[in-house]
Image: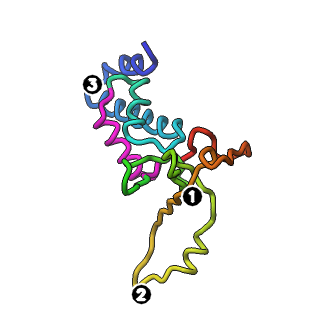
């Protein structure tokens, strides 16, 4: 039996309330670990499949609830696209994205556009911009033929 099963067995005698809280913590940790491990801005289905490999009894609704909770807590980011399912990003520091128009992969783009955007956006009087998301469209290094081996550069598995 894996470590998770043993952990549950050891805590079983503490009662249903404790087991429920422990299970939620383990499930949330597994979901967070999956988003971070996949490194490709996975969809909920991809996260579900990754978590299910380690915890076969987990349900889609549980993964979905945990993704929403982790995003609300700021531990992951939700990346919304008009024509694609929601994607999740384990990298929460400020950055932008490139969606490849050929293969559909997502890549992280490191750029400090904040000063540029603030200087050029005409915000209506009284309005306050709290957040923004920028998703560039174009070709990833593989599709453009410009594959780079530089540290931090995109790899064949999309970094987004």
3D distance between C-alphas at marks 3 and 1: 44 Å
Dot 3 or dot 1: first in sequence order is 3
Q: Along the horizontal axis of the image, is 84 left or right of 155? A: left
Instruction: Give the percent coordinates (x, y) of residue 26.
Output: 40, 31
Which element type, helix, strand or loop, lies under badge 1? Answer: loop
Q: Are marks 3 and 1 in contact (CB under 8 Å)?
A: no
Pick the front one: 15 or 27: 27
* Residue 125, disc: 2
SS assignment for the magenta stretch, majority: helix
Pick the front one: 126 or 110: 110
Total marks placed: 3
Determine if the magenta segment contains residue 69: yes
Q: Quadrant of the N terminus?
A: top left
Instruction: Give the percent coordinates (x, y) of residue 160.
Output: 54, 47
Dot 2 or dot 3: first in sequence order is 3
Q: Are marks 2 and 3 in contact (CB under 8 Å)?
A: no
Q: Which residue, as the protein is rendered here, is positioned at the far top? A: 1
Q: Are marks 2 and 1 in contact (CB under 8 Å)?
A: no
Residue at left 35%, top 30%? 23
Instruction: Name the residue that disc number 1 marks.
Output: 95
3D distance between C-alphas at marks 2 and 3: 56 Å
Instruction: Give the percent coordinates (x, y) of residue 147.
Output: 68, 45
């Amino acid at each position: 039996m894996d470590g998770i099963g043993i952990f549950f067995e050891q805590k079983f005698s503490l009662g249903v309330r404790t087991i429920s809280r422990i299970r939620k913590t383990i499930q949330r940790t597994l979901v967070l670990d999956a988003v971070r491990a996949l490194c490709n801005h996975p969809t909920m289905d991809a996260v579900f499949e990754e978590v299910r490999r380690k915890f076969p009894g987990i349900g889609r609704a549980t993964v979905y609830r945990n993704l929403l909770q982790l995003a609300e807590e700021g531990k992951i980011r939700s990346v919304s696209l008009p024509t694609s399912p929601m994607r999740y990003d384990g990298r929460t520091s400020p950055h932008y994205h490139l969606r490849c128009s050929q293969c559909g992969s997502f890549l992280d783009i490191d750029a400090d556009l904040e000063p540029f955007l603030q200087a050029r956006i005409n915000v209506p009087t009284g309005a306050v911009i709290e957040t923004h998301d920028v998703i560039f469209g174009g070709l990833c290094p593989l599709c453009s033929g410009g594959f780079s081996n530089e540290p931090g550069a995109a790899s064949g598995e999309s970094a987004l």
